[in-house]
Amino acid sequence: MKDSAKYAKIVEWSDKDQCFIGSCPGLFYGGCHGDNEQEVFAELCEIVEETIVLYKQDSKPLPLPTYGKDYVNKMSNLA
């Protein structure tokens, strides 16, 4: 498993910004945005990969992974 697969990646619509916003909680703040959901997700995945490379180049430990937390079911229970 690649390190990038250990981090939840979220793409959601923002009424405020009128576009899709991509983020990776736990790895970095902010993210990317755009009008096409699939393109935002692809860009987000690239940013996650690049961020992990930077952590490793700087010999910094990666933040704790966010996978395996069952976010989908937790969020659906809130609805």
Image (cartoon, rainbow, N blue to C red):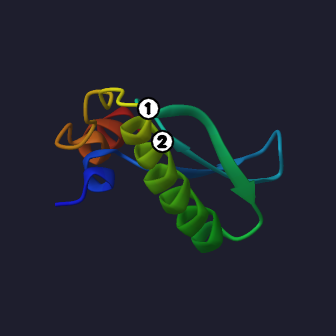
Q: Is residue 16 left or right of residue 4?
A: right
The numbered disc on residue 34 is none
User: Which quadrant of the figure contains the C terminus?
Assistant: top left
Say which residue appears at 47% left-offset and 50% top-offset.
48
Q: At 28% from the left edge and 55% from the top edge, which residue is drawn?
A: 5
The image quadrant of residue 39 is bottom right
For image coordinates 52% across by 32% down, the residue present is 28
Local SS, label 1: loop
Mark 2 closeness class: few <14, some 14–19, many ≥20 residues within 10 Å = few
Is 56 positioned to the left or the right of 39 in the image?
left
Q: Amino acid at mark 2?
A: Leu
Q: Secondary structure at mark 2?
A: helix
Image spot of residue 15 (x, y percent): 78, 44
Q: Which residue is mark 1?
A: 58
Observer-nearest of 79 and 57: 57
**Residue 65, relative to residue 36: is it above or below?**
above
* Image point (36%, 27%), residue name: 60
- The answer to the question of whether label 1 and label 2 lie on touching residues, with beta carbons closer than 8 A, is yes
Indicate the position of residue 33 as horizontal and vertical percent values.
72, 53
**Residue 62 locus on image (x, y percent):** 31, 32
Q: Which residue is mark 2?
A: 54
Left or right, residue 32 beside residue 45 = right
